[in-house]
């Protein structure tokens, strides 16, 4: 029996979160012992009740089901830190609630195997593909320029153009991470400098890398990700403004070492239309 802690956050997207919980609950019948940590980040009352009702009905579908309803938004970093503190398993699955998980458990089995094979792997992530264009890459890991600009690798390319191999990357989007608990404990919790969203995941990956851990992307595992479902609806924290502020903050924090972390140039970064127009 493989033991795994899984973590999900919710803000006013109860049904979407429940869809993922149902998929994760099935792992319990497929050779996995799951400690499920679900945290609601200050949703409306009816959303909190909907999750509470689901958890009560599903309490026997996991080895342990922990449901926490926060009175305010702890942020993506703060909410996940709660799960990291509660995690009992040696590997921790951190996910956004807007993933479309496959029915077949092969995706988590592959990520698990990659981490088992490499004792230096601190995080193993999949290749993310677009929810509405599953044949198009959203990001196969993250690269940094010498000035600290972030680029999603292979973004907007056809999945057929990307070899299904495992590669080491500077960072991985936290939409789906398998984290080694030993590595997380070695560098500490997610930084609260980047509340409530954006750049905390890249910052964490940099800290892991500096401590000698590797960030891997297994490009044979493709997970659909709808992207920005929660962050685009946070009225008190406009997405674009927060992204710019935290980008500047990240660059200032790591300015001395960014040149040695660089794996891409400005020309490699693409944030244009999806799918990308063919030359």
Image (spheres, grey):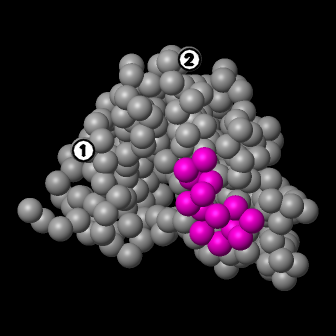
Report the mark closest to the observer, 1 or 2: 1
Q: Is residue 201 visible?
A: no
- 166 relative to 139, above or below: above
Q: Residue at x 38, y 76 (%)?
A: 132
| Viewer-nearest residue: 150 or 172 | 150
Q: Residue at x 54, y 43 (%)?
A: 247
Q: Residue at x 30, y 41 (%)?
A: 266
Magenta stretch: dominant SS? helix
- 267 relative to 115, above or below: below
Q: Give the x, y percent position of residue 106.
A: 42, 54
Which residues, given as a range, are shown in magenta? Answer: 232-245
| Residue 236 counted in the magenta span | yes
Q: Is residue 210 left or right of residue 196?
A: left
Residue positioned most to the right: 71
Residue at mark 1 to residue at mark 2: CA–CA distance? 29 Å
User: Disc 1 on helix, strand or loop?
Assistant: helix
Q: Give the x, y percent position of residue 88.
A: 75, 38
Q: Are marks 1 and 2 in contact (CB under 8 Å)?
A: no
Q: Which residue is mark 2?
A: 211
Q: Quadrant of residue 168?
A: top left
């Amino acid at each position: 029996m493989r033991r795994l802690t899984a973590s999900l956050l919710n803000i006013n997207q109860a049904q979407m979160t429940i869809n993922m919980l149902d998929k994760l609950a099935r792992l319990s019948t497929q050779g996995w012992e799951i400690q499920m940590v679900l945290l609601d980040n200050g949703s409306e009352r009816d959303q909190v009740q909907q999750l509470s009702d689901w958890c009560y009905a599903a309490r026997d579908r996991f080895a342990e089901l922990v449901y926490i309803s926060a009175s305010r938004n702890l942020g993506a970093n703060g909410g996940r830190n709660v799960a990291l503190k509660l995690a009992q398993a040696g590997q921790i699955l951190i996910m956004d609630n807007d993933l479309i998980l496959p029915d077949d458990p092969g995706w988590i089995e592959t990520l698990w195997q990659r981490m088992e094979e490499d004792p230096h792997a601190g995080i193993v992530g999949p290749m993310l593909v677009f929810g509405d264009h599953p044949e198009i890459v959203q990001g196969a890991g993250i690269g940094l320029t010498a000035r600290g600009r972030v680029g999603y690798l292979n973004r907007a390319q056809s999945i057929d153009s990307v070899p299904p191999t495992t590669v080491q990357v500077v960072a991985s989007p936290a939409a789906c991470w398998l984290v080694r608990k030993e590595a997380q404990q070695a560098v500490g919790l997610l930084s609260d400098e980047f509340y409530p969203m954006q750049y905390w995941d890249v910052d964490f990956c940099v800290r892991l890398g500096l401590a000698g851990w590797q960030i891997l992307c297994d490009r044979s595992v493709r997970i659909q990700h709808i992207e920005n479902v929660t962050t685009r609806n946070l009225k008190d924290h406009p997405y674009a403004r927060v992204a710019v502020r935290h980008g500047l903050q990240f660059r200032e924090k790591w300015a001395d070492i960014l040149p040695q972390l660089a794996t891409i140039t400005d020309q490699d970064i693409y944030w244009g239309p999806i799918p990308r127009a063919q030359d």
